[in-house]
Every structure is written in structure tokens, then in C-alpha cells.
Amino acid sequence: MSQTPLAERMRPSRLEDLIGQDHLSAPSSFLYKAIKSGNVPSLILWGPPGVGKTTIANIIANEIKAPFYTLSAISSGVKDIREVIEKARFQMGVVLFIDEIHRFNKSQQDALLGAVEKGTIRLIGATTENPSFEVNAALLSRCQVFTLNPLGRTELEAMVRQAMEHDVLLKKKNIEIKEIEALLRLSGGDGRKLLNLFEIVVEGINEDPCVLTNDKVTEIAQQKIAMYDKSGEMHYDIISAFIKSIRGSDPNAAVYWLARMIEGGEDVKFIARRLVILASEDIGNANPNALLLATNCFEAVRMIGYPESRIILAQCVTYLASSAKSNASYMAINKAQAIVRQEGDLPVPLHLRNAPTKLMKDLNYGKEYKYSHDYENNFIQQEFMPDRLKGSKLYEPGNNARENELRKNLQKLWKNKYGY
């Protein structure tokens, strides 16, 4: 087999050939038009590993024919950034691609600001982390953010078929895919991982025809896993098991997966940030203290780092796993956003509108609004929803001690309006 991995050999050079991310590659999309016109702005590509971030950066480099520089945030620093910026002063339309930009600290990101703002460089940053948390607000405001979606079974199977049809080396082998489930499962939705594992398995089957079954894939993957997973992207499988263990109220399993991440050198902020999200998504109002503890845990480990952070993480993890669970608030915002997407921008009822000017008051803005604190128990029934959504119930308290108290209070206030 070639020394160049299959995923690299199959990397497309045109947006039309990209599998998945149809919302970015469609001719009507902003990114497609920007690439075809050559007017690509500074942008951040955010998504899980192996879904096309680096590929899109390479497509941009190929399509716009501009000077193109690549840095990795793992191995590059301010000196490297300044060297590229200095070169860019004497070139037109320079594009700088920074992989894993979330690993740059504040001073490294600040080094990019002036050049991006003046247009000396067009920045393309790739990140698996939420840029709202990991990219400076000043830099983020100067970039367009594009979210890449996880690859589904259809896209992953299409990538395998495409490789079998177009890769010169694979076409020489008589490959028959009898079962594909293990290949898809072990790839974890990562297209790069999928293709490289596919090549490893094909190389490991010394038979003609080369028949892939779940058992053969699993056996060969286990033999080659150390070579195959050098990038450490298995951490997405580990974090999944970790979160599901906490959600499932198993502190023993949760602390085991925590130990796996710690021993593997996982970023302490990566772990703590997911605990903050889980505290709201899976515990919520069943135990509001969970969010307070998780937030404090994040701040503490950020200040202290390893090895002592393991103790703080263990305290938070065992507490969250042992806590009562509720996803009621998470479900409520999901329902609310679905309604907003379906109904659009419904008008705010007149009595709820702000009326800072005489004209607005003349138009009845704020008229008939009842100030809750002027009434008994600081409450008076009135309508707060847009007219079309009157009586819509989005929040259903969970069946636990704390939210049952919330339910009782809502029943007392709203009587039968929302059916609490």
C-alpha cells in the first residue's frame, strides 16, 4: 500500500466532490459562492474530527489560487504567526490556515488580530471546540463561523464506495463488503478514521476476494489500534461513555472513564466544560447546585491544572453522577426553538412592549401591562406569549423532589391554564 494514507489520497480538491456538509457545499450556500468568486472572508470551521474542516481549507487553497500557509496550533507559536504575516505584507490575498486554533492561547490569538482586521491575511481556523469558548471575542467577531455536521451512515458508506471506485490501489484488490457495521462503529463518525481503518483492514486480509465482515474488521482493528489511533481521537468515544455514565447515575463507571481521560493526558478544560453542560442538560432544576459546582469546578481546574485537578474533577463527577436527574429545561428550550423555527418572528404583544417615547405610548406600547409586584404574592395572571401561542406549555417539570415543588407553585399560580 501507499505511504500516503487513504484519507489523504481521497481528499477532494473541489467543493462539489465533498461528501457531507451539503449546507456548505450547495451552489446556493454562502461558502460556495465565496469560494467560486474568490472573495473568501476570514472564517472559523467548527465541527467534530474527520468531517471535512481541513478538506474545506484545502479546497479553498485549490480553488482561489491565493498564497496559502498552514500552521498547527499544537506546534506553532507567535513567532510562526508573525513570520507568515510578514510574508503576507508582500503578497495579495494570503490565506492562513490554522488547525486546532482552540489550542492557541490569548497572546497567540491576539497576534492574529491586526492582520485579520487590516486584511493582510484571511484566516481559516479549524476547531473541534465551541469557538464561543475558545476563540477570543475580538478575533471571533472578525470571522464568519461555519458549523460542520457529524457524518451519518449514508455519508460514511458513500466515502467507502468512493474510495473503492476511485483509489488506484484499492481498485487493484477484489474487495467485497459483506458487513460494514463494525467499520462504521469503530470510526465513530470520523471520515478520516473510517478511510484509514478501511485501508488497514483491506491490507490485513490476505485473501482473494478480500471479504470484509464485522469479525474481521474488529480483529484487525484491535491488532492495529495503537498505530491507527495515534492522534488520540478515541477521546470522543471515551467522553461519550463518560457523559452517559454520569447521566445514568453510575459514579463508579463515571470516575473510571474520568481516570481513562486523565491518564491519557486529556485537556482538563475539555473535561470540565462538558461537566458544566451536563449539569444543565441532564440535571437542571432537579438539583440547581449541580451547575454551581460544575461551574466552580471549571474555574478551579483552569487555575490549578494537573495533577491536583484530578481531585476536583473526581468530586464534581461523583456528585453529578449521584444527583437526581432531569432534562426538563433542556427539552423546554428544544421545543421553544422548534416553535421559533416553525412560526418565525411572531410579534410581541403590545402590553409587553417597551414604550420609551411618546409615539410608542400613543401606539399603546406597554398599555394594560400589569406589574406583578403590585399584586398579592407578587403575581397576577396575564398573557406573556405571542397571540398565536397562547396557552402553549413548553416546560414540564421533571418528576423529582425539587421540580415537584416548582410544579406545585406553577399549579397554584396558573391554576389550569398550562395543565400543570
Image (cartoon, helix red, strand yellow):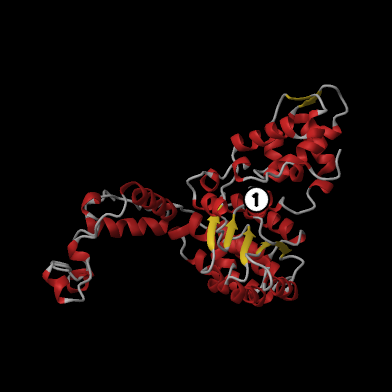
Residue drawn at 71 percent across, 61 percent down: 266
Q: Position of residue 413 (x, y in %)?
A: 23, 60
Q: In this view of the protein, which residue sits in the foreground, 208 or 395?
A: 208
The residue carrying pointer 1 sits among few (fewer than 14), some (14 to 19) or many (20 or more) residues within 10 Å by Cα, namely: many
SS assignment at label 1: helix
| Left or right: 167, with 144 as reference point | right
| Left or right: 207, with 16 as reference point | right
Relative height, residue 396 to residue 6 (above, below): below
Q: Position of residue 355 (x, y in %)?
A: 20, 72
Residue drawn at 60 percent across, 67 percent down: 134
Q: What residue did someone put label 1 on? A: 59
Relative height, residue 242 to residue 100 (above, below): above
Residue drawn at 73 percent across, 40 percent down: 195
Residue farthest to the right, as pictured: 206
Amino acid type at image mark 1: Ile
Report the quarter where the N terminus lies: top right
| Left or right: 59, with 169 as reference point | left
Relative height, residue 92 to residue 208 (above, below): below
Residue farthest to the top, as pictured: 209
Q: Position of residue 106 (x, y in %)?
A: 63, 75
Relative height, residue 417 to residue 69 (above, below): above
Residue farthest to the left, as pictured: 362
Q: Is residue 396 visible?
A: no
